[in-house]
Image: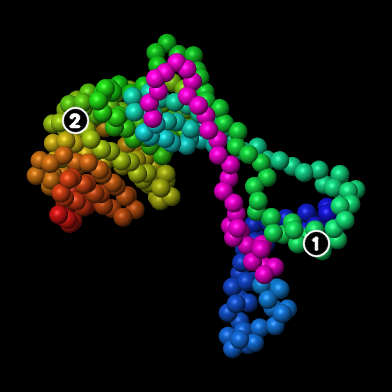
Amino acid sequence: SRAMSVRSRRQTLSNLYDLNSEALNTKRSTAGEREGKVTDEMCDKHSEIAKQLPFSNAPMSYWVHLGAPPPGPHAPLVSIRLALSDRCLAVDSKGIFHFFRWAWKPEFKDESSDEDEDDGYTSEETHLATEIDIFKDSGCFVAQRELFSFRTIPRLPFSSATRSATVCVSQTLFANRSLLLVLSDGDGRGALAMQLVDPVKGAIRGEVIVPAAHADRITAMKMDPIGTAAGQGGVGGELAIVGSADGSVSLWRFISSHFWPLRPRLRMMGHAGASVHAVAVSSSLGICASISSGRCCLFDIGNGAMVRNLS
């Protein structure tokens, strides 16, 4: 029956791994296959296993489009981060925070009603059809924009009318794993702004601006988790690299259980005063990079020494 075929196509994760290893072992085993002596039974077995392998023919999930609420005009989103299990924090080019909530809504079929229906197909044909669609999405995404009550609009402390906001959102949750750390340009003259944002309540829980972190405005920033947040040992937190229009780069270290730093851990030069356009940092590789219009510099995040200079 159809109910039996639906139950037979459901595989646990361990069974999928067993199928994967069985397919690989069968492919490597017999010398007859290497010599081209493949029987029809072997081909049928391999095709049946291939249909059950995970992500072999998995389709793209559904899209969800949420329009911006009135009134306008609105600005495009420049930074976005998923938080917790069902939250999303986004920042637009004007520095305003947007909060979203999403969930996956599965669609369950009534197997008891399918058991009574007879559509003229045999059990073998029904079993083959269900095997082909084993990884098809049965459901859809449900999302909504969270509009909280607030006295002032939650936003970055500084935004320019001529340039998009320079902002970066952490992957690590701070303050008992409930808040996101948001770094941005503090005043357009080199200050660094730090904010703790609650994605559940839609509120800013803390804000600090470090003045004169650079001699000119901040142009680029990037963050990377360290410690337990990156799957490694040690205290969890984030490494942040900040580039400026004065040609310098600073490295900041934020620990989730400590106070915010008021000065950078390292300060690096190498662009001869040219404005830094992009930065990157990798705690696992132990290096960071900064790019200007004509040069790319690689630095060691341990001591700030330049590893390589590419012109």
Which image quarter holds the N terminus?
bottom right
What residue is shown at x 75% (from left), y 62% (from top)?
128
Please tell me whether residue 242 belongs to the stretch shown in magenta. no
User: Which of the two discs, 2 and 1, labels the residue nearer the N terminus?
Assistant: 1
Question: Quadrant location of residue 211?
Answer: top left
Depth check: give the residue in front, 52 or 306.
52
In this view of the protein, can residue 88 be seen by the observer? Answer: yes
Between the C-alphas of marks 2 and 1, the distance is: 66 Å
The region drawn magenta spans: 47-76
Local secondary structure at mark 1: helix
Magenta segment main secondary structure: loop
Question: Quadrant location of residue 194?
Answer: top left
In the picture, the disc for residue 217 is 2
**Image location (x, y in percent) of residue 179:** 43, 30
Q: Is residue 244 above or below residue 211?
A: below
Q: Is residue 194 above or below residue 18?
A: above
Q: Is residue 46 above or below residue 289?
A: below
Depth check: give the residue in front, 207 or 269.
269
Q: Amino acid at mark 2?
A: Arg
Relative to residue 301, is residue 24 drawn left or right? right
In the picture, the disc for residue 170 is none
In this view of the protein, can residue 302 be seen by the observer? Answer: no
Looking at this view, name the residue that lies furthest to the left.
Answer: 272
Write down the residue under mark 1: 125
Q: Amino acid at mark 1?
A: Glu
Please tell me whether residue 56 belongs to the stretch shown in magenta. yes
Q: How is the image coloured?
A: rainbow
**Image location (x, y in percent) of residue 163:** 26, 28
Local secondary structure at mark 2: loop
What residue is shown at x 19% (from left), y 51% (from top)?
296
